[in-house]
């Protein structure tokens, strides 16, 4: 007998019918002789709807009350799911994040888990019951308030439970068959990976792949939890996300390239005519960091001989661009730059694969393919196992497909997408 944590996302529990379907899946696992703990997201688009509602009341909802509101979404789905399981003759108990011992720091809207004390979950398991835990939420000991883990945080709830309970596997159920070589909504010929290393998965998630929440992947890697990403709409095996200790089992069969991810959530700011002297970049990025903006790519040009000035471009989340532009503008004289430019019609496409470490010529092959397709590259950045390019936003689907084909990732058949949202 093993202990399995299962996470079901919003699109898997979007109405009464799907909640019953998920309940059946959970019961099947229990029948097969396993202990089951479930982390569940809010039904369908509930979290978005609650967010809209809050903004109708106030343009800047109070953070404490906003968390209080959003966590109700998961309370609805957990209770309904427990009812559905009970009506099938199995014992089930739902718990809020705080009842399940999800202890977080006090950051409303983006809290980090600091401790997990799932005493009641354990008790439920010991008594033969299935434990259903509300995803995406926790409790801060000092403020004694309810917190949320940030959008998409139910994955992290599941991983944290799996780590604390020493589960054998953490299954993340979603609306596609697993982790694909590209978003199957954009690239029809994408194929499912049977396994991917957590290192590659981290890069894919950071590069915009939405199938797993990046913090959940980080948590799983840190706590050595094996993830199994699979569809709640089929019984097929999904994708195993494995940690270094299991590399021997999987690595030999892994291809050079894991996949192509895309990201349309970023904007680009260019600071032109920056004096090329020590301290200017420090000043610029200290100001940007002060706005809480997470910088992704940074590119600095060679300075012009005639002016001794250079241009610095960087990408950041679209939502953070306006306030960063304002702060930089306010410090224009102090930094001594010429002008600021803002561009939110950009997109990023990234090729990820740990085989890049040992294979020369991957970037040449990528640039060649893009050149042949007449695609112009704006920025380039690389890590040991990733090459990212920035192109015009409307070119992203084409660039993604071109790269996918160039690296031999196309499958013979079209990928199946069971539901609409990607979560
Ligand atoms: N319901 C939350 C959201 O939509 C958490 C989650 O789905 O993981 O972001
Ligand atoms: Mg959701």
Image (cartoon, helix red, strand yellow):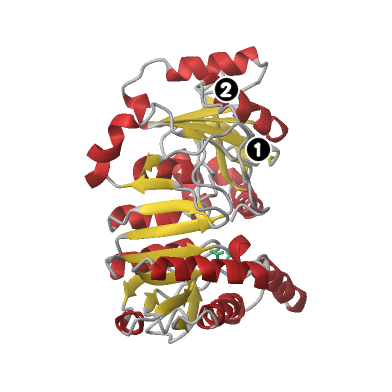
Residue 421's place in the image compared with 253, above or below, is: below
Q: Which of marks 1 and 2 precedes in the sequence?
A: 1
Residue 69's place in the image compared with 12, above or below, is: below
Q: Say which element carries label 2.
A: helix
Mark 2 residue's CB less than 8 Å from ligand 2: no
Picture quarter containing residue 403? top right
Nearer to the camera, 327 or 322: 322
Nearer to the camera, 421 or 313: 421
Q: Say which element carries label 1.
A: loop
Which quarter is ligand 1 in?
bottom right
Q: Is residue 172 visible?
A: yes
Quarter of the figure that contains the C terminus: bottom right
Q: Label 1 belongs to which residue?
A: 186
Q: Residue at x 42, y 40 (%)?
A: 194
Residue 63's place in the image compared with 241, above or below, is: below
Residue 388 pos. (x, y %): 51, 31
| 332 to the left or right of 125 | right
Mark 1 residue's CB less than 8 Å from ligand 2: no
Quarter of the figure that contains the N terminus: bottom left
Q: Residue at x 65, y 37 (%)?
A: 186
Q: Which mark is residue 405?
A: 2
């Amino acid at each position: 007998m093993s202990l399995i944590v299962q996470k079901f996302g919003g699109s898997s529990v979007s109405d009464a019918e799907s909640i019953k379907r998920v309940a059946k899946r959970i019961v099947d696992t229990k029948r097969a002789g396993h202990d089951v703990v479930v982390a569940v997201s809010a039904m369908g688009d509930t979290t978005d709807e609650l967010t809209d509602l809050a903004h109708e009341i106030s343009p800047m909802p109070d953070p404490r009350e906003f968390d209080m509101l959003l966590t109700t979404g998961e309370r609805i789905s957990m209770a309904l799911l427990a009812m559905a399981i009970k009506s099938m003759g199995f014992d089930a108990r739902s718990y809020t994040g705080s009842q399940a011992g999800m202890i977080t720091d006090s950051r409303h809207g983006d809290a980090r888990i600091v401790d997990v004390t799932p005493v009641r979950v354990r008790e439920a398991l010991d008594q033969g019951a299935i434990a259903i835990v509300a995803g995406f939420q926790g409790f801060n000991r000092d403020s004694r308030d309810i917190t949320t883990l940030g959008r998409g945080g139910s994955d992290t709830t599941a991983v944290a439970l799996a780590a604390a309970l020493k589960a054998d596997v953490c299954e993340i159920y979603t609306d596609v068959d697993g982790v694909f070589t590209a978003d199957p909504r954009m690239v029809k010929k994408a194929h499912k990976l049977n396994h991917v290393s957590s290192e590659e998965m981290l890069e894919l998630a950071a590069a915009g792949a939405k199938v797993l929440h990046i913090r959940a992947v980080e948590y799983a890697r840190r706590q050595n939890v094996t993830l199994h990403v699979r569809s709640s709409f089929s019984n097929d095996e999904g994708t195993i996300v494995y940690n270094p200790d299991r590399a021997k089992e999987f690595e030999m069969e892994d291809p050079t390239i894991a996949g192509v991810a895309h990201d349309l959530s970023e904007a680009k700011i260019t600071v032109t005519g920056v004096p090329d002297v020590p301290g200017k970049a420090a000043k610029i990025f200290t100001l940007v960091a002060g706005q809480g903006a997470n910088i992704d790519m940074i590119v600095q040009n060679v300075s012009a001989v005639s002016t001794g000035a250079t241009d610095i471009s960087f990408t950041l989340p679209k939502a953070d661009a306006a306030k960063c532009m304002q702060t930089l503008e306010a410090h224009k004289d102090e930094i001594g730059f010429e002008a600021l430019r803002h561009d939110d019609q950009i997109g990023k496409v990234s090729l990820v694969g740990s085989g890049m470490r040992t294979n020369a010529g991957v970037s040449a092959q990528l640039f060649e393919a893009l050149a042949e397709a007449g695609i112009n590259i704006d920025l380039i950045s690389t890590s040991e196992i990733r090459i990212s390019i920035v192109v015009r936003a409307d070119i992203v689907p084409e660039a993604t497909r071109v790269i996918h084909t160039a690296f031999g990732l196309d499958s013979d058949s079209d990928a199946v997408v069971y539901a609409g949202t990607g979560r």
